[in-house]
């Protein structure tokens, strides 16, 4: 996730540390290392300054881990490595500058490598390659959607034409979409078998879990089948196009999973055809769970895939 950290955050951090240190020094020019509140500095920076906008637990742990390597008594020692050496990426260690004047720090900064390795921030050496691969995957998905979508003007007819145009004169994309929707309706079950709810079964936490998940899947199945039937009727000229139906047609024609169908987590950019196949497999699993429950089998011994 991207966080819009910038120079104001850095300046705020510096002012926060300066204020805290001046309050503890009480007019003294120097402060012993054992009197510096390292933990407080870490928490102020991690929770109040930078951490105030981080809502991802993993990112928060990375930030705390990074700060703990910087705000430590060892940072005042000789040969303190700001960045440890990494043989895998051929990254040389970067040590804290040994100086007190501004010119000395500028000279140290000028000698830093021109290429900044992800290992400087504690990330894997291939972090940039992973990011570029993800961007390339997104670009490829967008290109495929452009090739299959065609122009908006060719894809959708206005409401007046849709009411008067016969099915034989409909565009090719509509006929293809109608066939695909019909195939999906055939693959999808009509409904899911309900799990028998008894006074004893509801005491079992596994039963309550599977029943809750099966209920969500059953509601989603009804919604998907209703939408697909509307698509078939619209493509056949039996149903008038509405704004909601046009968005549904556009999503299916471009290979996107409609927003109303995204009730569980799937990989970003997954094609709707792949989503439907996965949804069918999930429904078959729920059907097997319901059959096992109604047959009196122990749900704890039931093998499922997540």
Image (spheres, helix red, strand yellow):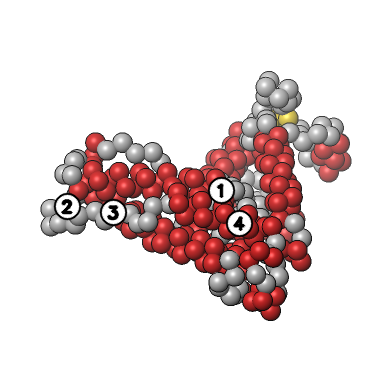
In depth, the one of 217 and 158 nearer the eye is 158
In depth, the one of 35 and 107 nearer the eye is 107
Q: Find disc 2 in the rendering and name its residue.
A: 201
Q: Are marks 1 and 4 in contact (CB under 8 Å)?
A: no
Alpha carbon of mark 1 to alpha carbon of mark 4: how far?
A: 11 Å
Foreground tag (3 vs 2):
3
Q: Quadrant of residue 274?
A: top right
- Is 38 positioned to the left or the right of 5 in the image? left
Give the mark nearer the N terminus: 3 vs 1.
Answer: 3
Q: Find disc 3 in the rendering and name its residue.
A: 193
Coordinates of residue 173 in the picture (x, y in percent): 67, 57
SS label for mark 4: helix
Give residue 273's mark: 1
User: Does the rendering let one see residue 153?
Assistant: yes
Give the mark nearer the N terminus: 2 vs 4.
Answer: 4
Q: Are marks 3 and 2 in contact (CB under 8 Å)?
A: no
Foreground tag (1 vs 4):
4
SS label for mark 2: helix
């Amino acid at each position: 996730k991207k966080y819009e950290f910038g120079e104001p955050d850095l300046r705020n951090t510096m002012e926060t540390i300066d204020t805290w240190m001046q309050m503890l020094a009480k007019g003294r020019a120097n402060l012993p290392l054992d009197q510096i509140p390292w933990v407080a500095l870490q928490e102020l920076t991690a929770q109040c300054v930078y951490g105030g906008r981080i809502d991802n637990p993993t990112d928060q742990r990375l930030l705390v881990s990074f700060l703990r390597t910087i705000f430590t008594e060892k940072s005042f020692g000789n040969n303190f490595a700001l960045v440890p050496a990494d043989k895998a990426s051929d990254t040389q260690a970067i040590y804290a500058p040994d100086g007190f004047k501004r010119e000395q720090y500028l000279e140290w900064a000028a000698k830093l490598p021109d290429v900044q390795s992800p290992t400087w921030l504690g990330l894997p050496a291939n972090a940039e390659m992973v990011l570029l691969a993800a961007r390339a995957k997104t670009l490829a998905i967008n290109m495929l959607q452009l090739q299959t979508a065609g122009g908006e003007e060719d894809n959708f007819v206005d409401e007046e034409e849709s009411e008067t145009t016969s099915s034989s004169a409909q565009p090719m994309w509509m006929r293809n979409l109608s066939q695909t929707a019909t195939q999906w309706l055939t693959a999808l079950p009509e409904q899911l078998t309900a799990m028998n709810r008894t006074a004893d079964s509801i005491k079992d936490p596994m039963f309550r879990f599977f029943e809750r998940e099966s209920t969500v899947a059953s509601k989603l199945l009804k919604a998907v089948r209703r939408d697909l039937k509307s698509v078939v009727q619209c493509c056949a000229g039996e149903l008038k196009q509405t704004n909601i139906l046009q968005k549904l047609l556009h999503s299916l024609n471009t290979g996107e999973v409609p927003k109303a169908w995204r009730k569980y987590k799937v990989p970003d950019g997954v094609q709707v055809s792949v989503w439907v196949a996965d949804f069918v497999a999930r429904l078959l699993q729920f059907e097997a769970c319901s059959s096992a429950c109604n047959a009196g089998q122990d749900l704890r011994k039931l093998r499922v895939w997540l």
